[in-house]
Image: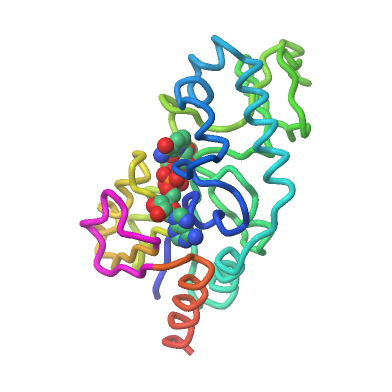
Amino acid sequence: MEKIVILTGAGISAESGLSTFRDEGGLWAQHRIEDVATPEGFARNPALVQGFYNARRVQAAGVKPNAAHKALARLQRDWPDEVVIVTQNVDSLHEAGGARNVIHMHGTLAGAFCSNCGNRWTAPSEMAVGEPCPSCNQPTARPDVVWFGEMPYHMDEIYAHLASASLFAAIGTSGQVYPAAAFVHEAQAAGARTVEINLEPSVGASGFDTYILGKASETVPHWVGQLLAQHS
Ligand code: NAD
């Protein structure tokens, strides 16, 4: 059988209207990573960080999945073996496009997390500074997203999937942020074929067997169609 593991990044959501980290003029361009995406930044200025994620949450709530998200859901549905989607994205567009069991290694905008007791719950659309945790009542609520310097979620599960993959695809990710950037090597060590789908080869792209270049909304449905045709 042929298990497929797919890693997605900001590029798959770009055509839905969510800016990637390197886009000019996007939310990220107005802030330094150190200020809004680190635990130290949150400790220094929680209002700035909550405001930044509140804005991203509102933006994410107003967009729709594009043809690439839907094509991956179709692959999950119609492929005869397991298709695992691991995403670095904190939006919910894979799920909105019909995908199941998506592994959010960098957390989600939809979630809140208590740094005091570890409780998780659904985030309100606007999180206030010092918002109390519904479980321990401490003012230690934060967005349930993984910041630089923190350990991504579900790593044991992801490595187990990579170790049993026959095909690994990285879609719309710049390959600059570890550990996700090294998944291609893990998959290759396990004997998987590897393909990168992106506008241009990513920074760490030397490791892939195949490259498919172009907009995700066009390349991903085409790739999925070819895979399913080979197995029909
Ligand atoms: P990224 O913005 O670094 O890269 C996006 C990639 O998508 C690029 O390689 C680009 O060529 C590609 N792309 C853009 N539009 C596309 C389209 N329509 N079709 C196909 N590909 C397209 O995003 P990333 O790789 O997801 O970033 C990884 C992680 O880094 C994020 O989850 C985040 O946690 C973290 N992060 C990165 C930065 C940064 O500056 N790189 C900043 C903050 C956080």
Q: Position of residue 77 (x, y in %)?
A: 60, 73
Count of numbered circles in the view: 0
Residue drawn 73% across the image and 46% down it: 61
Q: Residue furthest front?
A: 25
User: On the picture, is 12 further left or further right than 207?
Assistant: right
In the rendered image of this protein, does residue 157 appear above or below residue 41?
below
Residue at position x 62%, y 64% in the image: 66
Q: Residue 187, how many percent across, how many down?
A: 30, 57
Magenta stretch, residue numbers: 198-213
**Which quadrant, please, contains the N terminus?**
bottom left
Q: Nearer the viewer, residue 54 or 223?
A: 54
Q: Is residue 200 magenta?
A: yes
Q: Specify whether residue 219 is painted magenta.
A: no
Query: Can residue 144 be spotted in the picture?
Result: yes
**Residue 58 or 151: which is nearer the viewer?**
58
Q: In the image, is 42 to the left or to the right of 135?
A: left
Q: Looking at the rendering, which quadrant does residue 101 occupy? A: bottom right
Residue drawn at the location 44% of the way across and 42% of the way down: 22
Viewer-closest of 106 and 18: 18
